Image (cartoon, coloured by chain):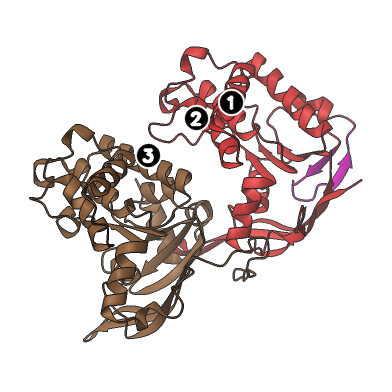
Chain colours: A red, B brown
Amino acid sequence: MTRVLDIQALSKGFSLHHLGQDIAAFDAISFSLDAGEFVLIKGINGAGKSTLLRTIYRSYLPRGGAVVFHSAHGPIDLARAADVDIAHLRRTEIGFVTQFLNARPRVSAEALVAEPLRLAGESADAALHTARGWLSTFGVKEELWQAYPSTFSGGEQQKVNLARALILPRKLILLDEPTASLDAGARAALVARLAELKENGAAMLGVFHHPGDVADLIDRVIDLTPDAAPEEDREDVAV
Amino acid sequence: MTTMTLEPPRLVRTKPLLEIRDVSRSYGEVRALHKVSATAYPGEVLGIVGESGSGKSTLLRMMNLEELPDSGSYHLDLPDTPGDLFELDRFARRMLCATRIGIVYQNPHLGLLMKHSSSGNVAERLLIAGERRFGVLREKAREALSASEFPLERLDAPPIELSGGMQQRVQLAKAIALEPALLLLDEPTTGLDVSVQALLLDTLKRLQQERKITMVIVSHDLGVIRTLADRVMVMRRGEVVEVGLADQVFQDPQHPYTQQLVHAKL
């Protein structure tokens, strides 16, 4: 198996200066992830599941440890990599999928979805064509494609977000509850797309409210609940 | 429990387009800037936030070579522009500034001749750079105004007759007319109403994506910075207190001042 991620003794906490408080999120987590592997992170509320994903993505700054990502340019520690290198990896190799859309004023749904392709160098027409395909796959009604998603319902926004976040293949995909509040059709489309990306070698690390949604994809489970066994093979995925 | 120090870039091999090192400036007793360093990579948008008096606008004026520091250096990675730009003579500074750097001020009166035509304002930039053919001046001004999404039927209207949002578009057209390597934006949307602000932000984002133009934007509006910036630098009392990826600075601010700033956002 090709290694994609090696997490070594990763720690994260938050200093709230105005309260003089220090909140620990998780301490000395270690595990690794191979190409084509799908790992579920579970744990009670507040165990640090989303925090772990954001720390790997570097939306949060780690306190200690290493996040070695085996990029196309060789291994690089995401915990210490320069900001511009992280920005580069986010454009090319590492994806983050949430349930929330970052709508921008006066940018249509189809333009938002096409943007990652255009930035990766595809022609505007080809990018738009592919984007419309994905909007359709995720069940966004055609009348909405040219509208501005800031006024869409939560569910429709989420579909636009999924189309945008999963339009480009990535080596590592971080999933923060992407199935929450999706209708059945969109959920099936999402699971199918994840299966396809996994088949093509993407490594995935995800937090799911209802892991049953992705039961067939899960290879391993990591439990962040304090005092839980650090890692278990997947037998049943009920949380 | 301190934050870990980051490594120098390894994957991004290009040199920064803009590099400011250890810039200090005092006005009498007042320390406006103290050992401020900043970098911006080609095509990157650097956001600078901080309250009034933090030194962010002074720093931007220095990037535009309008003002010189007491100490420190400034490099732009451009052909024919070697060495410390602060050491250039006044004429060379003005020429560089007119041809390679564009700026949009919060106050359009600073950037525009309010009673001359809008197209004339844009063409003036080209005249300074040596263009003398009337047809070319007119055409290039038109192109720049069109790229800034300025309504072309108002090409000859003087800025004084235009709305605030339109005045900013004329400034923007003037700034990009010569395809500058660096675009500086000083509170470009402050004072505009929300819908006009959204339109201008969208234009800026589009220009940035299409032209891969390197931008430095100063604003006290965190929403504006969040929409445009790749990286954010937080200033307070003339010093840089924090630099990081925009989402990191907003979601996991490290410095007490940044935490206060982020939590104060509506």
What range of the chain is rendered magenta? A220-234
Q: Residue B76 has which mark?
A: none
Q: Which quadrant would the C terminus of chain B be assigned to in this image?
A: top left
Q: Position of residue B107 (x, y in %)?
A: 18, 55
- Spatial distance from mark 3 to mark 2, Cα to Cα? 12 Å
Q: Position of residue A208 (x, y in %)?
A: 70, 33
Q: Is residue A216 above or below residue B145?
A: above
Q: Is residue B57 above or below residue B171?
A: below
Q: Amino acid at mark 1?
A: Ala
Find disc 1 in the rendering and name its residue.
A131
Identify which residue is drawn at 90% across, 31% down. Answer: A235
Q: Nearer the viewer, residue A14 or A82?
A: A82
Label 2 CA crowd tier, 10 Å (few <14, some 14–19, many 20+):
many
Residue A227 shows in the view: yes
Q: Nearer the viewer, residue A143 or B211?
A: B211
Residue B110, image quadrant? bottom left
Find disc 3 in the rendering and name its residue.
B202
Mark 2 / mark 1, whichever is N-terminal: 2
To the question of a shared chain for discs 3 and 1, the answer is no
Find disc 2 in the rendering and name its residue.
A111
Identify which residue is drawn at 67% across, 60% down. Answer: B11
Relative to A56, B214 lies left or right: left
Q: Which quadrant would the N terminus of chain B be assigned to in this image?
A: bottom right
